[in-house]
């Protein structure tokens, strides 16, 4: 299918496709997506509100 596995990266972003290797990366994927749709500042604010250290 043309996919290239990158074993040392838990999340791979290729243009508008984000892949990850297991469900434990869900927050990281969500934060990457939020940042790409809004801004770093907004993402940091959301992380703070959710209790993640920024």
Image: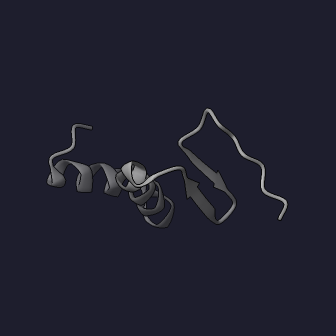
Which residue is drawn at the image coordinates 69% and 60% (left, top)?
15
Q: Position of residue 23 (x, y in %)?
A: 40, 55
Q: Residue at x 61, y 49 (%)?
A: 12
Picture layout, residue 19 above or below residue 6: below
- Residue 42 horizontal side relative to residue 2, left or right: left
Residue nearest the viewer, comparing 47 with 3: 3
Relative depth, front residue between 29 and 4: 4
In this rendering, the answer to whether 21 lies above or below 1 is: above
Instruction: Using residue 5 as the reference point, say whether residue 21 is left or right of it.
Output: left
Residue at the location (35% across, 53% down)? 27
Q: Quadrant of the C terminus?
A: top left
Residue 34 x/y as whole percent: 41, 62
Q: How is the image coloured?
A: one colour
Q: Nearer the viewer, residue 21 or 54?
A: 21
Task: From the viewer's side, name the closer residue of 2 and 13.
Answer: 2
Residue 28 x %, y %: 40, 49
Quadrant containing the N terminus in the rendered view? bottom right
Give the left or right position of residue 50, taking residue 28 as reference: left
């Amino acid at each position: 299918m043309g996919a290239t596995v990158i074993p040392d990266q838990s999340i791979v972003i290729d243009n508008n496709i984000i892949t990850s290797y297991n469900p434990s990366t869900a927050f990281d994927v969500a934060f990457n997506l939020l940042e790409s749709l809004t801004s770093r500042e907004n993402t940091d604010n959301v992380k703070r509100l959710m209790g993640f250290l920024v």
